[in-house]
Image (cartoon, helix red, strand yellow):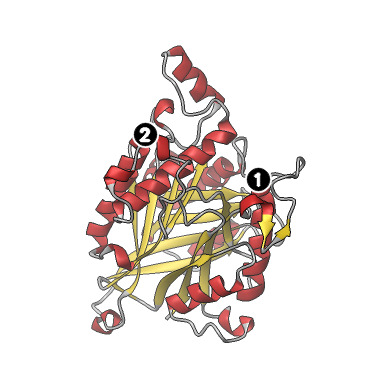
Amino acid sequence: MLKTGVHRISMASPADVSGLKRLIDEGIVEPTTIVASIGKTEGNGGANDFTRALATLSAAELLSRYLGLTTDEVTERIAFVWSGGCEGVLSPHMTIFTREDVPAQPAATQDGGRLAVSVQQTRSFLPEEVGRLAEVHEVAAAVRRALTELAVPPVDVHYVQVKGPLLTPAGISDADRRGATVVSTDPNRSKAYARGATALGVALGLGEVDEAEISEEVIATDMQLYSEVASTSAGGELTNCEVLVFANSPLYAGDLRIGHGVLRDAIDMDGVREALHNAGLDATVEPNEQSRRIRAVFAKAEAPVGGLLRGQRTTMLSDADIHWERHARAAVGAVLSALTGDPRIFVSGGTEHQQLPGQAPIAVIVEA
């Protein structure tokens, strides 16, 4: 059988990998078993957020020394997913995922299996393919490969994290020289199309939408098409998509399970409890008791539709100084931290085709 390990590590800066080094040196994490990392950096989360690339390089350089590989070989072997923006109480951190062989444990299959992860990659995309059907179909194929690898039906998938490319000025210029047309000439605007296309890819791969419903025109436009478990991000540090599919699988052992829910707005505490309950926790216990069994929390953040939160006006969509994504991440991060007792929460902005407009997905990993 296989077993997934989860280690949440605090970071003093985007280049700080001392916590990971300590876990390796103390024998808690075997570097050859690391398959992925998902983390938050204190960058701005925009097209010019270079903290994500710095964090990847720092982790890859550390692991290259233990694995005897080049940094490029490390990043080909391990998926590094970073989201910029630690507004409010959100704390910079990384969550390391390991996978190792363990003796068969039949009891693990009796309650739906244990935490499993499949890491897939798409091919690299040309600038004119970003945010378009090419991404949708490539991500869908990656999700289907993951379902086969994990031996689970779509209903057992609780979280799919996709990190893909956005359009950079260099990419836009390259497309223009070749006479190709990109989805947007604004790098920051291209994030919405990129996130939307990859989220629709998840939805297609899991059978949440039909192929006939998807066209170039619906991407980042028809928000009635969505995935309940997709969480997608875009950055300039990638040219392909990294697709991490999390499920509870009978092929996996251990003491971890994953569950998911929906945040119906930025202050939806019941949505957090729903996700905890779905993962197997008694969501009525006090936060300090919960926190001992919560190993990781992943959520998206969205501005309320029309700027109205439960009938009251907010300034998220009208603030000319602070982008709404930063407002939303701070608000959702505060709610999640208060309920779970730990500010090391992964909150990413932008929910195109990830739940209905104004809503956002949430997933939690807990000790069973």
- Which residue is rendered at x = 42% and y = 26% of the image? 128
Residue reaching furthest to the front:
311
Amino acid marked by disc 1: Gly
* Upstream in sequence: badge 2 or badge 1: 1
- The residue carrying mark 2 is 124
Residue 183 vertical position relative to residue 54 in the rendered view, above or below:
above
Please give left or right for residue 206 compared with residue 178 in the image.
Answer: left
User: Does dot 1 land on a helix, a strand or a loop?
Assistant: loop
Within-10-Å neighbours for mark 1: few <14, some 14–19, many 20+: some
Please tell me which residue lies in front, 82 or 126: 126
Amino acid marked by disc 2: Ser
Please give left or right for residue 212 compared with residue 263 in the image.
Answer: left
Residue 141 horizontal/vertical position (percent): 27, 46
Residue 280 horizontal/vertical position (percent): 43, 80
- Which residue is rendered at x = 29% and y = 62% of the image? 154
Residue 109 horizontal/vertical position (percent): 26, 79
Task: State the separation of the CA atoms marked 2 and 1.
Answer: 25 Å
- Which residue is rendered at x = 22% and y = 58% of the image? 148
- Per the rendering, the mark at residue 43 is 1
Q: Is residue 185 visible?
A: yes
Screen quadrant of the N terminus: bottom left
Please tell me which residue lies in front, 272 or 90: 272
